[in-house]
Image (tube, rainbow, N blue to C red):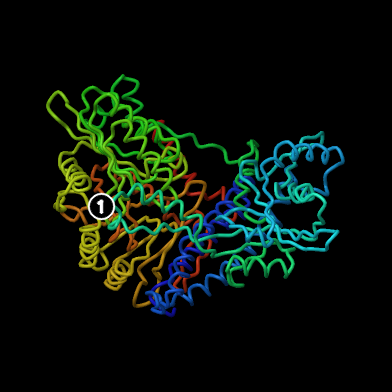
Amino acid sequence: MSTPLINREVSWLDFNQRVLELADEPGIPLLERLKFIAICSSNLDEFFQVRVAALKDQVAAGMVTPSADGLTPAAQLAEIGREVAEFVARQEAVFLDRVIPALQQHDVHIVPMSALTPAETRWLSQEFQQRMFPVLTPLAVDPAHPFPYISNLALSLAATVTDPETGERRFARVKVPNVFPRLIEIRGRRKGRRFVLAEDVISAHLHTLFSGMVIEEQAVFRVTRNADLTLEDEEADDLLAAVEMELRKRRFGGAVRLEVQESISEELLELLIRELNVEPADVYTMRGPVDLTGMFQLASIDDPELRDTPWLPLTASRIAAAEAADRSIFDVVRERALTVHHPYESFASSVEAFIAEAADDPRVQSIKMTMYRAGGDSPIARSLMRAAERGVQVAVLVELKARFDEATNVGWAKALERSGVHVVYGLVGLKTHAKTTLVVRNDDDGLRRYCHIGTGNYNSKTARLYKDFGFLTCDPHIGHDVSQLFNHLTGYSRSQEYESLLVAPKYLRNQLYDLIEREKSLGPEGRITAKMNSIADAGMVEALYDASRAGVRIDLVVRGICCLRPGVPGMSENITVRSVLGRYLEHSRIIRFAHGGDNNTPLFVIGSADWMGRNLDGRVEVMVPVSHPKHQLWLDKMFEILLSPDIVRWELDPDGEWTRHGDPDFSVADGQARFYQWVRDRQRH
């Protein structure tokens, strides 16, 4: 152990390695394994666009100050280069040597053009002429045509083209458009399903794009560019217009990675390196297809035998009972606060239904919501628009700077405004990451505030894939706090003290420190259990180290980045860290302080904040206490399963290495499956 902290970027790469291990799990169906391969590639794309790009900017600016783990920006880039090269080799081995052969045994094939029959070749040539040729644009480089701009993540063919009469050689590029599928299914009489890569089809017909020329060489390549949106909102008079301008600039960011086909010649590679202004260390050579995110298409084919057995979401029992009695969600929440655990419990019949009922209820007077990642087709956004159109006061804080969702959020902001919704864009210098809704309703006994606070986004698509908790309540203290929060976000006021909520950036960090200190004061009787996406904040890590030194037992379940080193004698010997992965993405943030409540009772808090500097200091985050015994029982059961000694999990050791534990057959010891069964059993009884 060289430093008390693990490097953040290395820890993230370790997380992506754990995802890749899911693709190599024999107990996971083949198409789901293929999906994990595609997820790994998508994750890596974002990592280069944001994290690697930021480090390159630091190096270009001459920064040599090491991060908290002791690595300078240049040293981090060197380590990333080594780790990514090894990762790509492992990913290709899993894909080419294990998953693809296994798919072939089930008559699912990706075939080269040379494997097609004459009849199949003729059919594919017709498809090319009718559907592909009209949208392709060959771009040659000569004195009148400069080297073309290669957009971010665009798959391309590079070619050397020669005029047979003059002997003149030219570089040419053909983009593989995403208007047609990456994998083209072959129609024929053969058994099974057979696909050809779109770039292979274009490559085989490249001579038709350069009529009369000789194609000397061709190779597939892809460029990754700096795509981090850099926006000084303090200087932006119109944040909406500023974000739209930055989105247009994103396509033209500097190149940070070049992926090339293994067969590329040194001459052609040197030309790409020179023209794209990348370093040789930024080049990754692929023996299989370039850009495995294209495998999402193959992973989605309809073959139930090769897919997970669906876990159908259940309607929360109290909501189901209310529906049967023709009662509203407001009736349910008025009786007692409600927690819902997505996707085991349906997002559509709980949160979406709550917003939809509020939109149509004549007693509802106002609705306020934070919107971070709404998704492209949002029933919630449409409910808000419907409410505004019928005269309800609706205010929505749309976070325009939610990375890679900026364009979608700009579109929703405009649509909401056209419907009469009051749209605001948050506080200067901060992202609003909190997931909160406030509904004011004129009940028979007076105005009442109904609140939803969640760990996940108001996004119908991800709510079917991400594990998150939602909390619905009409508790007057929480309602007061949520009202204060929205007044602060939409108006012009100083931040107020909150009675129940833990709110960042002003309060949350110190509140967490105080709760950790309280457990620390109890020594070996202290206990902290937490589930996070990421733990990277040096201050929070040191607070946990201090508590461990005092004897506090700390169990952490961390999906992604973890910069903390557990099990180090004299520093963290009372801390364990594990990661649990599966068909659902573990997204919820839940903390249990064994003596954090009144009279030293357990305190559970759930919310939107990870333990990272950006969450604690640079974002508006909300966490809420969960106090009802039945809700705490649910959370305790979740922790019991996640911390079980026999489920499949990855454990972190003091040297920063993650090791898989549990039954070799993933399906035998899948913690998520175990929890789903527990939820179903509770619903039956």
| Residue at image coords 64%, 36% | 302
Q: In this view, does 163 lie to the left or right of 239?
A: right
Residue 453 visible, this orientation: no
Q: In this view, does 201 lie to the left or right of 432?
A: right
Residue 558 visible, this orientation: yes
Q: Position of residue 346 (x, y in %)?
A: 41, 34
Of 446 and 46, the residue lying toward us: 46
Image vertical order of residue 311 relative to residue 25, above or below = above
| Residue at image coords 80%, 57% | 215
Residue 381, picture quadrant: top left
Q: Quadrant of the N terminus?
A: bottom left
Identify the residue position indicated by label 1 in the image.
Answer: 427
Q: Residues within 10 Å of mark 1 (few under 14, many from 20)?
A: some
Image vertical order of residue 566 relative to residue 473, above or below = below
Residue 6, picture quadrant: bottom left
Of 374 and 314, the residue lying toward us: 374
Q: Where is residue 38 in the image (x, y as percent from the top left)?
A: 59, 51
Hey, what amino acid is under mark 1? Leu
| Residue at image coords 48%, 49% | 671
Q: Position of residue 318 (x, y in %)?
A: 32, 30
| Residue at image coords 29%, 60% | 616
Residue 290, picture quadrant: bottom right
